[in-house]
Amino acid sequence: MDEGDDVTDEARTTAALTALGVRPGDVLLVHASLRSLGPVADGARGVLGALRRAVGTEGTVVAPAFTPENSDTSPHYRERVRGLDAGGVDAVRASMPPYDPALTPAPSMGALAEAVRTAAGAGRSAHPQTSFAALGPGAARLLAGHRPDCHLGEDSPLARLYEADARILLLGTGYATCTAFHLGEYRMPGPSRRSYRCVVASQGVRRWWEYEDVALDDGDFTALGAAFEEAAAEGDVRTGHVGAAVSRLVRLRPAVDFATAWLTEHRTAGR
């Protein structure tokens, strides 16, 4: 069998992205399940290459590069220490490295996010738990000013993506992974808040840092996404196949605006 029959190459992936509606100059916030896409030549690097070809030299590709691995208030940490005795917990905590935007990997974000983060010329925002990586001429502007006590609000790349009229690309993933909906949580009136803690480095010294921010909750994002898609205006959501995966191209601004109103209504009612 010819390799082209069962492995998607970069040119075919680019063509599929273009058919979905990706255009030169786009700013794309990408969430991807490469397993859902099926075999792609050069794996994550090949998909990133296709994305960059689709958005062209004036476009920018952005991906979450979150690091729950350096926090002891994250679900990732709670799962890691489940069943350990006090000594085991202490050993885990002692082994957790401080966040370094140049070096800290983001393994829980998937292979494509890591491909963006490690690509030559990529930038990364400063937040020690919810950083974003970006590649393209808009990267520096989108990533600047990510306050360490603001995960995904007005002082994060999500707000800059909103201003840039970016689009969200869900490659083989659903709305449960739609990070942009979190900006709607910040824009709700009186959102719930909680404490977070993670390992950082201050003047080369490793230390734990605790701060307060909005209580992030993606548990209802699937329902939120379904409601948004049902109410979306023409052109706000485009659906098609990239490789073997059903994928969506979503305008970020209307998605966040809808999320703000929907979350305000549904979460207030649930209190």
Image (cartoon, rainbow, N blue to C red):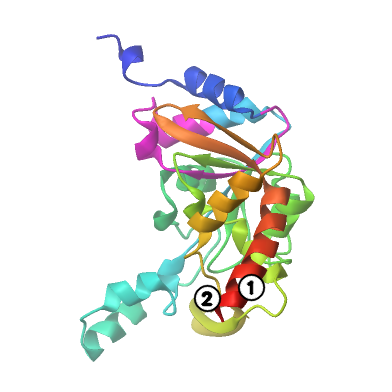
Quadrant of the rendering where the C terminus is positioned: bottom right
| CA distance separating discs 2 and 1 | 10 Å
| Left or right: 71 as drawn, with respect to 14 | left
Q: Position of residue 199 (x, y in %)?
A: 48, 77
Q: Tell me the quarter of the picture where residue 44 sits.
A: top left
Question: Which dot, 2 or 1, sits closer to the camera?
Answer: 1
- CB of mark 2 within 8 Å of CB of mark 1? yes
The amino acid marked with disc number 1 is Pro
Residue linked to disc 2: 200
Q: Taking 64 as reference, is 25 left or right?
A: right
Q: Residue furthest top?
A: 2
Pointer 1: what residue?
148
Residue at image x 71%, y 44%? 166
Residue at image point 77% right, 47% down? 164
Magenta range: 23-49
Query: N-terminal of the two: label 2 or label 1?
Result: 1
